[in-house]
Amino acid sequence: MYIKLQKLFLLLVFLGLGAQAQEKKYEIQTIAFYNCENLFDTIRDPKIYDEEWTPTGAQAWTSKKYNKKLSNLAKVMSQIGTDDNTKMPAIIGVAEIENRGVLEDLVRQPLLAPGDYGIAHFDSPDRRGIDVALLYQKKHFKVTNSTAHPLYIYDMNKVDRTTGEKGVRIYTRDQLLVSGNLDGEEVHFIVNHWPSRVGGEKKSSPLREAAAALNKKIIDSLYTINPNAKVITMGDMNDGPYNNSMKKVLQTAGKKEDLKPQGLFNPMEKMSKDGLGTLAYRDAWDVFDQMVVTEPYMRGDYSAWGFWKARIYKKPFMVQPTGQYKGYPLRNSNGEPGYSDHFPVYIYLIREMK
């Protein structure tokens, strides 16, 4: 798709382009992330704690409910970004999915099937069995490499029963790195789902800071190979843009003028400042779902893919309409499938058409 001239006024203002640029046309791709909130199949897996999500479990999770959940997620994913782009997202990072099988069922949904999505996925050691993954439209993105980067963190208040040594590993999600060519240009995606806030934000913060350190290590390694590496790190960070993991460890900048060479720009910081949110807890909104881009996306050279803008995707059908949680994301409730307890986030990449 290209952005038609009559729709381009705001974009031209953003880019600071002159009158000559008004004759240019731009192609656009949507890059999205969605925490799918407990996308489990109905089959008991003895290696993980998925008893709740079986027909005889607490959620009474039947095939009918599972298929409704898939349909709901496909409805959202197929529409993300369509306010400014008629195409479905070229890339969708996902979290809280049980296995490759549920991903295969998801991309076969009638609303997503036309996108012909490929899957990049590895099983994580998470005790609940939930993983991250990347869905990509095969006609737009060609994978050259995908790797899972495990996060090694330990509870030093416990003793390992096998070794007798202090420190027990906390098993959580790997960070998924997928490299490839987006319509012919090399790009990299990292999909994250950082440790939760169980035990409280302050007590659990070091776990997410460790996740941020691993993320920075991956990005720095890509910068070492290519100083102009274009990386998008996305996911449910379980922290907001102003928490230590983002500001002190990843060292993200929320304003373009504060962005340093080979730094990281976080467009979600302004959203948080403006009071927007991707999830709510006790009527307080936060932006845990974030998309961060490396500095080469922000250089204003639109002969190659560049960052345009970021958004939270929130439509009325995704919102709880009544009751105590009116206005919250319409999530799974009382064993009935909803959409998710998170709203998805997305960014637009643009470049000049040749």
Image: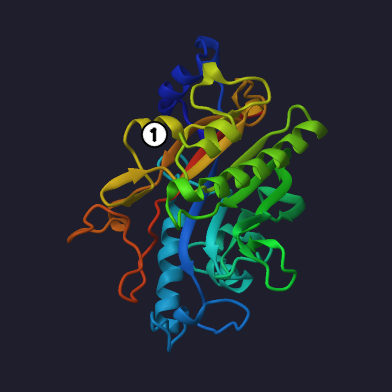
Q: What residue occupies the far right of the structure in this picture?
A: 225
- Please say which color scheme the image uses: rainbow
Answer above or below: position of 154 versus 254.
below
| Image spot of residue 244 (x, y percent) | 52, 36
Answer above or below: position of 256 versus 233.
above
Answer above or below: position of 145 versus 213.
below
Q: Is residue 238 visible?
A: no
- Residue 302 location, quadrant: top right
Residue closest to the eye, 67 or 249: 249
| Image spot of residue 137 (x, y percent) | 62, 54
Residue closest to the eye, 73 or 267: 267
Q: Is residue 24 visible?
A: yes
Whether residue 83 sits left or right of residue 295 in the image: it is: left
| Image spot of residue 8 (x, y percent) | 44, 25
- Residue 99 location, quadrant: bottom right
The count of marks equals 1
Residue beneath disc 1? 271
* Label 1: which secondary element: helix
- Amino acid on which the number 1 mark rests in the picture: Met
Q: Residues within 10 Å of mark 1 (few under 14, many from 20)?
A: some
Give the quadrant of the N terminus: top right
Answer above or below: position of 269 versus 207.
above
- Residue 120 location, quadrant: bottom right
Please name the residue shown 42% across and 61% down the image. Answer: 75
Q: What residue occupies the far bottom of the structure in this picture?
A: 56
| Image spot of residue 18 (x, y percent) | 51, 10
